Structure formats: structure tokens, C-alpha cells
Amino acid sequence: MRPDPTQVETARTNKLRTTGGSHRLTLVKAAVDEAGIDPRPPRPTLAHLPAGPGVWLAFDVDQYPSQRDRVAARAAVSDLFEPAEPIVGEFPIQLRGKLGSAVTRVPGELLDRVGLQTGDGVATIAVAPGALLVVAASVAGERPEEVAAAAEAARAALQSSDR
């Protein structure tokens, strides 16, 4: 689970789409599998935390029940992307699945905070068991070193937590 900048630049992406009036994202299967997140019923709830422009973290709340630990990982990632204003909020969403894929609803407020919109490509990177870094394809392509460092910073913050 240690992506290097070359892996980040070439990471698979899926597009944000709108279905039934809500935004949806199919998470990249390889990253979901690497993080050990099972999209089959009973499906886990993922807490989505915006972390910077084009970047957010998603945590399986059963594996990371402490909001303090999730926020510490977000802070470690935010420090690398230096958002213009403080990024706050957490959006717990139950994962959905279809034919082995992991689909998550993405609240419009989350997209507003990270500056993404329908049609944007989004990469999913495993950070730790039950934890994903979700990054706009443009950010992954333009700043692969920062994205790789962000994945490592989130992993380190989670390892130092007392869960």
C-alpha cells in the first residue's frame, strides 16, 4: 500500500456521475480490494472527509470508529495540499455494490468543498486497511509526488492512532 509517484500518475480512474439526482462514484476495484473493503452485504459505511482541492479520504467506520483518528489523517493530508481555507466536514455514506463493484454516493457539499463536479475523473488509492485516498485525476497527473506523500502521511497518522 505504498504508491510511488509513477503509480499515482497512472492510477486508474472512474468518472463522477449523476444518477437519480445524486452524485455517484464507482471506486476503483483494485484499491478497494487492496484496502480490504468488502462491497458485499452487509455493506460498510464509509466516512468521507474532504482534505484539500481535489482530494478526500474515505474510511470504513467499523475499522476506524474514532472520528479523532479520521480527522488526524485528514489533517496530515491537508497539510500537504495547503487548502486556501480550512476544510471541515464528514459525510458517512453506506457503500453500495453491483456485480462486485463498490459504488458510493458523493454528497454535493463534499464535491463543493474539494472543487469537483460531475464528469471529473477520480482515482482511488488504498492507504491502509479500510482507508482510501480519493483524488481528482487532474491532481494525480499534475502532482503525483504530493499524492504519494499524502497517502504515506495518512497511513502514518492512522498507524500512530490508538485504535
Image (cartoon, rainbow, N blue to C red):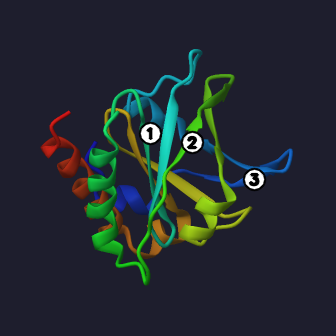
Give me the C-alpha separation between circle 3 and circle 2: 12 Å
Nearer-the-camera pick, 15 or 42: 42
Residue 116's image quarter? bottom right
Confirm or deny contact between disc 1 and disc 2 (CB under 8 A).
yes
Across and down, in percent, residue 81 comes to: 36, 74
Which mark, by number, is residue 17?
3
Task: Please indicate whether residue 71 sits to the left or right of residue 119 in the image.
Answer: left
Across and down, in percent, residue 145 comes to: 30, 69
Task: Please indicate whether residue 104 sits to the left or right of residue 145 in the image.
Answer: right
SS at circle 2: strand
Q: Earlier in the sequence, mark 3 or mark 1?
A: 3
Give me the C-alpha separation between circle 1 and circle 2: 8 Å
Q: Which residue lies furthest to the right in this view?
A: 20
Q: Which of marks 3 and 1 is in front?
A: 3
Across and down, in percent, residue 95 comes to: 59, 32
Q: Mark 2 points at which residue?
A: 27
